């Protein structure tokens, strides 16, 4: 990969940004891009000399406050912000699961091992996106998605069936979300990162399904893998957010995602 | 030469002899041990090596068509492996394992059809024919007589599939519909991999570069590189250690690495 992208240095103190872009296959060659302003359009980079580059790698709508509400944005970093929102939800859910009263008594040893691994993986994914986006966003102070708040309604975290059913829904939704979002990503380095995560989400989904119904084909059941084409689920952000949004109490928009 | 190295690696491997429960027996390649004891391997080596070498597939180009061609070859391999497994009777009947492998087999058959269509059908100049596979690797393996061997190869094929599709994603970035379909196959392979690993008593995800208990040393190429704990500059081992950090991300295989693995089974 020999991609070149120009990113404006807004906060030179954030040295991690250089590191992130470098390792993800990009090279910072200059500081030529300009932010267009500080109003509602602040999330759109404008630079005539770099129009091709920015439209492909990071132009368009960045995440940030729009009309008083945080919007996920629509460029590559917007898609990653969308993923960050989903990983925040998953991480929060499993954190509550493993810390719930009776975790060690209501779940089998195998359940506990799987759920603890998923807790680790999802928290790692969340913190990865936070670090990566903090490094890659031109102005992370205003463009980084804040910590979201969640509400699981009447879900009983001490009830095995309820927890596993919710985990299954979250993991299948995660798989569908990444599968649907891949085509929205322009930068091959970011696409690969999403690919590294989605297959782990699919491994999770399979394991949770297998815990729920072990003696079956549910690990890759006909409800998620089309039995005619052999293709897994995919969903657009608007479809995913309609599902995941039921758990998220923080208000945000996705105006620039399909 | 791949085959030679592959078989030599077995000669060095300590093979456990006792028969335990299924989960304990994954380290056993009893059939393989018999073959080695009969010294049949050295006899077959030269002709095996030559024929395998002659039929090796070559790396596909870094284009959307190349990506689909490589994927199709892998799906041919998986499809044939599972059909042969189901027909051989090596898979225990009537229980979880049979249900699992019937479902996996159906998916791989679907994937072959899907990819052939994606390449324009069997009359297309982009079509690639099914190679001839030897899942015994010249007699070193007996996957259709020995169930632990069948399971071990299934795990290797599924984990390879996950990594191979991931490695081809960038080649499909200019063709969004094909990219999406490839991602939809990629996650199915990952669901399969998780279940096969769990049938074998392992975690559904790959820890560091561990191939897992009972996996032959020759399958290590499937797992090398999975131990990565730096993702885009972020240390994924920071919070819960390197094992969890590596599990949370699957790594790609290059075209060359994928071809080298597939060629072990192509004659």
Image: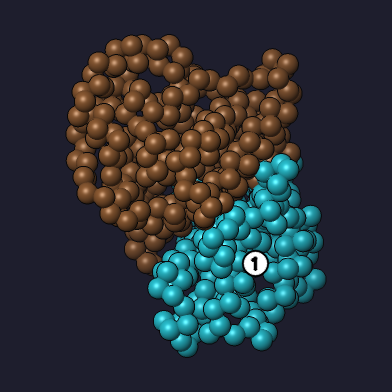
Left or right, residue A98 beside residue A86: left
Name the residue located 73 percent from the left edge and 39 percent from the top edge.
B177
Mark 1: few/some/many CA within 10 Å (<14, 14-19, 20+):
some
Q: Nearer the viewer, residue B209 or B218?
A: B218
Name the residue located 25 percent from the left edge and 15 percent from the top edge.
B43
Tell me the quadrant of the picture where the N terminus of chain B can be found. Answer: top left
Name the residue located 53 percent from the left edge and 70 percent from the top edge.
A91
Name the residue located 40 percent from the left edge and 43 percent from the top edge.
B147
A72 relative to B262, above or below: below
Q: Nearer the viewer, residue A74 or B3?
A: B3
Can residue B10 be seen from the camera position used here? no
Query: In the image, residue B35 lies at what x, y percent?
Result: 26, 29
Query: In the image, residue B245 lies at what x, y percent?
Result: 40, 59
Q: How many marks?
A: 1
* Chain ID, cyan in image: A
Query: In the image, residue A70 lies at what x, y percent?
Result: 71, 70
**Chain under callout 1:** A
Left or right, residue A73 beside residue A158: right
Can residue B29 be seen from the camera position used here? yes
Q: Nearer the viewer, residue A188 or B208?
A: B208
In this figure, which residue is indicated by the disc labeled 1? A169
Q: How is the image coloured?
A: by chain
* Chain ID, brown in image: B
Query: In the image, residue B102 lies at what x, y percent?
Result: 58, 45
Where residue B246 sits, quadrant-wise, is: bottom left
Where residue A42 sits, quadrant-wise, is: bottom right
Left or right, residue A204 beside residue A33: left
């Amino acid at each position: 990969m020999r991609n070149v992208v120009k990113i404006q240095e807004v906060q030179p103190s954030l040295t991690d940004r250089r590191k992130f872009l470098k390792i993800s296959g990009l090279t910072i060659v200059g500081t030529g891009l300009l932010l267009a302003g500080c109003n509602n359009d602040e999330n759109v980079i404008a630079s005539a000399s770099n129009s091709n580059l920015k439209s492909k790698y990071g132009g368009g709508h960045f995440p940030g406050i729009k009309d008083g509400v945080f919007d996920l944005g629509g460029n590559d970093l917007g898609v990653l912000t969308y993923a960050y929102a989903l990983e925040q939800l998953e991480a929060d859910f499993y954190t509550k699961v493993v810390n719930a009263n009776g975790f060690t008594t209501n779940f089998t040893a195998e359940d506990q091992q799987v759920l603890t691994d998923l807790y680790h993986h999802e928290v790692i994914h969340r913190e990865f996106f936070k670090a990566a986006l903090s490094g890659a966003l031109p102005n992370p102070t205003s463009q980084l998605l804040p910590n979201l708040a969640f509400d699981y309604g009447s879900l009983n975290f001490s009830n095995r069936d309820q927890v596993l059913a919710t985990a299954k829904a979250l993991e299948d939704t995660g798989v569908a979300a990444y599968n649907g979002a891949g085509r929205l990503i322009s930068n091959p380095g970011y696409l690969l990162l999403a690919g590294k995560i989605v297959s782990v989400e699919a491994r999770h989904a399979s394991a949770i399904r297998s815990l729920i119904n072990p003696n079956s084909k549910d690990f890759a059941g006909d409800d998620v893998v089309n039995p005619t084409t052999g293709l897994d689920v995919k969903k657009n952000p608007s479809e995913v957010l309609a599902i995941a949004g039921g758990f998220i109490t923080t208000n945000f928009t996705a105006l620039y995602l399909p | 030469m791949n085959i030679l190295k592959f078989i030599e690696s077995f000669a060095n491997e300590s093979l456990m002899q006792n028969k335990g429960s299924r989960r304990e027996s994954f380290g056993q390649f009893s059939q393989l041990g018999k073959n080695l004891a009969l010294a049949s391997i050295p006899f077959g080596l030269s002709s095996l090596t030559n024929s395998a070498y002659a039929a090796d597939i070559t790396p596909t180009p870094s284009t959307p068509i190349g990506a689909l061609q490589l994927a199709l070859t892998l799906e041919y391999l998986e499809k044939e492996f599972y059909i042969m497994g189901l027909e051989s009777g090596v898979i225990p009947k009537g229980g979880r394992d049979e249900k699992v492998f019937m479902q996996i087999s159906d998916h791989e058959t679907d994937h072959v059809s899907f990819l052939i269509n994606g390449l324009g059908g069997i009359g297309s100049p982009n079509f690639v024919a099914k190679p001839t596979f030897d899942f015994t690797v010249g007699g070193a393996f007996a996957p259709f007589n020995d169930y632990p061997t069948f399971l071990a190869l299934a795990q290797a094929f599924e984990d390879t599939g996950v990594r191979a599709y991931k490695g081809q994603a960038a080649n499909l970035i200019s063709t969004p519909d094909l990219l999406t379909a490839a991602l939809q196959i990629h996650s199915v392979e990952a669901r399969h991999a998780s279940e096969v690993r769990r049938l074998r008593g392992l975690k559904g995800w790959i820890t560091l570069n561990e191939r897992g208990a009972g996996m032959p040393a020759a399958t290590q190429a499937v797992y090398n590189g999975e131990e990565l704990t730096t993702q885009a500059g972020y240390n994924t081992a920071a919070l819960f250690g390197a094992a969890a950090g590596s599990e949370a991300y699957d790594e790609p295989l290059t075209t060359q690495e994928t071809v080298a693995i597939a060629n072990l089974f192509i004659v």
